[in-house]
Amino acid sequence: MMFAVAAIAVLVALALAVVRALAGPTVFDRLVAANSIGNCAILLLAVFGFLTGRPEFLDIGILYALLNIVGTIAVLKYFRFGDLGHRGGEEPTQ
């Protein structure tokens, strides 16, 4: 029962993050909201795995967390330098 309540709370947090991602006003607000959506998805995977008695979902959640980090870094690098192939040592030319 308690984990079902936790799942509902995570779904509410997910809905609020989706509203923030759509409302936005800046790209970075949307990026943080997208990262929060990914974190809520990881929490839902963990709670669902516990509710169904399948701990394999934790492994899927860890993999998704790694993809979430890499995706966030890639988007930030793109918005900073305008190119994903940029080495990142020097500042971009304006």
Image (cartoon, rainbow, N blue to C red):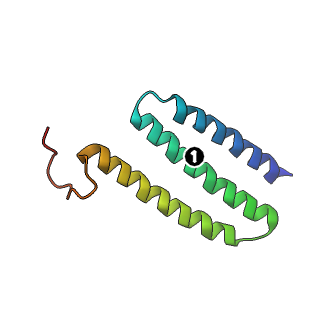
**Residue sitting farthest toward the right:** 1
Answer left or right for 26 relative to 38: left
Q: Position of residue 40 (x, y in %)?
A: 62, 49
Q: Position of residue 61 (x, y in %)?
A: 60, 63
Numbered label tally: 1
Q: Position of residue 69 (x, y in %)?
A: 44, 57
Q: Residue at x 40, y 35 (%)?
A: 27
Q: Quadrant of residue 70?
A: bottom left
Amino acid at dot 1: Ile
Foreground pick, 93 / 32: 93
User: Quarter of the image containing the C terminus?
Assistant: top left
Q: Residue at x 56, y 51 (%)?
A: 38
Q: Residue at x 68, y 60 (%)?
A: 46
> Pointer 1: residues within 10 angstroms few (<14), some, or many (20+)?
many
- Residue beneath label 1, please? 37
Answer left or right for 5 relative to 43: right
Q: Quadrant of residue 50?
A: bottom right
Foreground pick, 78 / 66: 78
- Image: 93 above or below 72: above
- Image: 7 above or below 58: above
Answer left or right for 87 relative to 55: left
- Image: 84 above or below 15: below
Q: Residue at x 80, y 46 (%)?
A: 5
Q: Secondary structure at mark 1?
A: helix
Q: Position of residue 66 (x, y in %)?
A: 48, 63
Answer left or right for 80 relative to 48: left
